[in-house]
Every structure is written in structure tokens, then in C-alpha cells.
Image (cartoon, rainbow, N blue to C red):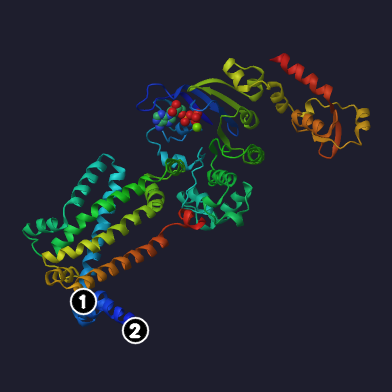
Amino acid sequence: MIVLDKVDKIFPGTTVPAVKQVSFQVDEGNICVFVGPSGCGKTTILRIINRLIEPTSGDIYIKGKKVSDKEVNPDHLRREIGYVIQQIGLLPHRTVEQNVALVPRLLKWPEERIKPRVKELLDMVGLDSNEVIHKYPFQLSGGMMQRVGVARALAADPPIMLMDEPFGAVDPIVRGRLQDEFLRLQKEMKKTICFVTHDINEAIKMGDHIVIMNKGELVQHGTPMEILTEPANDFVKDLIGVDREIKLLDLTRSSEIVDRNKEVLGETREKDCFISALDPVQRALETMMKNDSDIVVVRDGEKEIGTICWGDIKKLINKLSGEA
Amino acid sequence: MGFLSSILHWLSNFYDEYLGFINFIIRRWEQVLEYTANHFSLVLTVMFFSLILWISVGLLISRYEKLANTAFGIGNILFVIPSISLFGIFITIPMLGLGRTSAALALILYAMMPMVRNVYRGIKSVEWPIIEAGRGMGMSPRQILFQIQIPMAWPIIFAGIRVTVVMITGIATVATFIGERNLGRFIHHGIARESADMIIAGAVLVSVIAILLDYILGKIEDKITSPGLRKEQEQS
Ligand SMILES: Nc1ncnc2c1ncn2[C@@H]1O[C@H](COP(=O)(O)OP(=O)(O)O)[C@@H](O)[C@H]1O
Ligand SMILES: [Mg+2]
């Protein structure tokens, strides 16, 4: 869907490239997360994709079409690509409604189509549309602004979204909620997304595919599981941090290690700790700790399908560390 | 009772000394009307052309940065020329001579510095992420100028316009020396005849015009400026 081929970017007046020989591909309907320390070139890559800046060399293809061609009008290209900028960048002199309707109005949608669309979007990103629609950005909290920023990028239903640290300006609890909500949305929207973060945990949580960058270069790319189990070098290991096994628990579904032994299930029936089969194993561990229990019941919908005990989790950790 | 009469005495003295200009205005009302109307129309003419010219120049130099310093230089030089000599220079130009055209041209040149500078400052005050967001959404440079930069610059542009209007109303009095029959004439003649009433009448009427125009511009500014930009006032 999106392909970058040997892209270089050297900013005028600098000698060190901000982006160096970067090539990758983002598949349709996937979230590709770019992660790396501040200044490693993540924002630069997004701005190259929607041609806010021109690469020094290399090509960019979207749906097989070379968009780095001079004939492609960059303004028109950008209207087809949702962009959530790092600094949010809501227009302070415009209401929430006018901010969200920006791209549809540029695309000359009829007003009777824009009105309901704005309401729909605000509700979709978890805002009370009646409450916020006529407010100005300065009247919103940081979390609300970020939601409006996401709604604005989604407004014209672009197939591609570029999201630059979209949940960066809020506290960790709100961030977690925004991430969950966005993943739920994405299940329905199936957009092709380039997502930038400097937080490896966010990358693992949000990414179908992760691209790790350092000093303008692509260090490693792969699925979260591949990155965690086969870090390419010390840089990646350091980035992942010491709690690699715990992170792996987050990537394994409970259904994969559930013990379907009905006898054990009978014994634990009284207890109040349940998780869903789709929850990560991490959730099983958290539920255990919260309830001071060493066993949880796993449900698939209403049906109880089995249990996970502390021993099962320990076995998984041993197996995963063995793999690494 | 001596106390009361001394107060009355003091009041009537005060009136003669300082408020005698009211009598003057009442006595010479036809002339006052004529001079005020002339003053007003000169200021309005100057502001009309200044707005068109200097806002355009301000926008131009915010786009072509290289011209900015040149424009500021010219504006500053014009601004520091004493007004009486600037008027004087214009009347020596053939075709212009004594009269309204020379007066208006000189005043328009005075308006350059405060107006061009504020338009430029206003446009430049829009922070980078907001422009970047506009570009990122697919707005053309023109749309960014008219839908983001100018609307966001209004408070600073208006500050420039309001300072200019007050300033021009004041300096317009000097145009009386090159044939304008405006309120400056009262001040000029008042000085020549050592008549405080005339001087004060001229000065007060000039101030009233300035305050009135500033007030009207303030109202227009409130209408035009987005409430989203008025947060400081609202919160305090
Ligand atoms: N417009 C620019 N001019 C010069 N250097 C720039 C410009 N934009 C970014 N850079 C440099 O390029 C590098 C990468 O920046 P950026 O992509 O913003 O990093 P990240 O988003 O990963 O924090 C940095 O060293 C930054 O200073
Ligand atoms: Mg960045």
C-alpha cells in the first residue's frame, strides 16, 4: 500500500542526513509503528510520505502510484491522507466543528453531508458532540484536543492515516484509554496507518508491524513478536528494556495457554476472577494479583472454557525466554 | 457664606480659564463644523488608501522575506522625517502643490511604518505547528493565508490600524500649513493670537475624532476577531 524505496533526506544547511536509505512497506489495513529516540527521523518520514517535504533522493509509492512525481499535486495528495501532527495543531480561531470539517470543506462536500459527518466523528472518538461542537480549542483539555485532532484526520475517510505521536500530550491513563479506543475503531475502519511513537510499549500495543529507527537509519523491522524474540542488536535490546518477558505476555492470547481441564474449573467456580479468551496473558496475571489468587477462569463469550494458573504463565515465560 | 462665594468665584474663574473653549465652539460653530468635516474626511481618505496599500505591502513582505528589511527601513525613515518638512517636500513637487493631494500623500507615507510592521508581525505570529497542520490537511498557500494567517493576525493588525488612525488624526493638524482648512487651523491661529480657547477647542476636537475612530475600530475588531483568540480577556 505504502512503499518507500531508498529514501534519503538531508535538510538544507545540514550535513548529517535526517533520514538515510530507508526502505519499507506498509500493507493495506495494517498499523505500522515507527519507534525510536527523539530526533531519529520519525516525523521526517511521515512528512516525506505526504510530501510536506521532498526527499533528497528515493521514491515513494502509494497503491502502486509513484507520488514523489512532480506531476502529483501535493495539496490534493494530502487531502487524501489523514494527518495527525505531533503538536496537535488545531486552528485556535475555529470551533471544533470547523476544525473537524476542514478537509471535507476543502474537498467541497455539500454542507448537508458535513454536519452529520462531524457529529458522527466526534462521537466515534469518544467526545460528546453536543457539548464540544461549538467550543474553541482553548476550552478543551489535552485529551479532548488529541481526540479532535484524530477526528479531523479521519474526517474525509482517507484510506491512509499518518499519526505522529497522536496520544503524546496526555497522562498515561488517558493514553491507555485512547489507545484502546483507537484499536477498537481500527478493527472496523481497517485503515492503512503509519503511527509514530517514541514509546516501545505503545509500539508493541498498537503495531501490526514495527519499524525501529536510530539516527535516521532503519535498524530493524518486523512483527512485535519478532522484535521481542529476536532483537537485532543491543540498540533494540536497550529500547525494549528489561521487562521483555512481561511485554511478551502482552502479545500472547490467553486462549493459547488455557488449561481446558474441567475438574480444575469446577474448583475455581466460586472465585470472582474471569478473563476473556482474547485477552493477553498479561491480563490473566494482573487479574490474579488483583484478586490475590493463583488461578483465573477463562471465558469465551459466556462460556467458561478453562483456567490459567500461575504455573502455566511461568511455563510460558520460560518457553519465550528460551526462544530469545 | 464667604466660603460658598469663594467656591463660585473659583468655578467661574476655572470656566473662563479652561472651559472658555466651549463658548468659542458655540460662537464659531459654522467654522467648527467645516474644519471638523475637513479633518474627518482627510483622515478617512488617508486611512482608506493606507489600508489597501500597506496591508498589501505587509502581506507581500511576509511572503518575500528578503523585502522585509527594505520595507521596514523605508517605513522608519519616513516616520522620523518631521511632518512639517514632509508636507513641505510634497508641495514642491509639480502637479501636487498646496492642497489635499499633498497632505494625503504625506500622511499615507507616515502610516507605512506602524501598519506594515504590524501586518508583518501579525502574519508571522502564527505558530509553525498551525501552519503545518493547515498544509498537512491539504490547504494551498493561498488558503493558509486567508483562512489561517490573516484571521489569526487580526488582533495585531488592528492594533496597528488603531495606532495609525490616532496618529494620523493628530498629524493631520499640521497639514493646515499647506492649505488644509481643518482643526489644525484653530491651533495654528490660536498660537498666533495667543488665544487659549482656540488652541484648546482645536485640540479637544482632534482628540474627540481620534477617540471616536479608535472606538469604532475597536467595535469592528471585536466583530471580526474570532472568540477563540480572545481567551485571555475572557478568562481574566
Ligand atoms: N526543517 C528542518 N531543518 C533542519 N533539520 C531538521 C528539520 N526538521 C528536522 N530536522 C532534523 O532532522 C532530525 C530528525 O528530526 P525528526 O524527524 O523531527 O525526529 P523525530 O520525529 O524522530 O523526533 C533531527 O536531527 C532534526 O533536528
Ligand atoms: Mg517527531
Q: Amino acid at mark 2?
A: Gly
**Residue at coordinates 32% horizontally, 68% vertically from top-left?**
B212
In front: mark 2 or mark 1? 2
Q: Is residue A236 visible?
A: yes
Return the residue nearer the eye: B215 or A134.
Answer: B215
Mark found first going from the N terminus, 2 or 1:
2
Q: Residue B155's x, y, as percent? A: 39, 54
Q: Which residue is the site of mark 1?
A: B32
Return the residue nearer the eye: B100 or A82.
Answer: B100
Q: Which residue is the site of mark 2?
A: B2
B187 left or right of A26?
Answer: left
Q: Residue A290's x, y, as percent? A: 80, 34
Which of the 4 quarters of the picture holds residue B202? bottom left
Q: Is residue B79 above or below residue A82?
A: below
Q: Is residue A1 above or below residue A151?
A: above
Q: Amino acid at mark 1?
A: Val
Image quadrant where one finds the N terminus of chain B? bottom left
**Residue at coordinates 14% horizontally, 56% vertically from top-left?**
B86
Crowding around mark 2 (Cα neighbors within 10 Å: few <14, some 14 to 19, many 20+) is few
Element at label 2:
helix
B181 left or right of B47?
Answer: left
Q: Residue B192's x, y, as percent? A: 12, 69
Outermost residue to the front: B2
Which of the 4 quarters of the picture holds residue A16? top left
- Alpha carbon distance from label 2 to label 1: 40 Å
Element at label 1:
helix
Q: Residue A99's x, y, as percent? A: 50, 50
Which of the 4 quarters of the picture holds residue B220? bottom left
Return the residue nearer the eye: A84 or A49.
Answer: A84
Chain identity of mark 2: B
Outermost residue to the bottom: B1
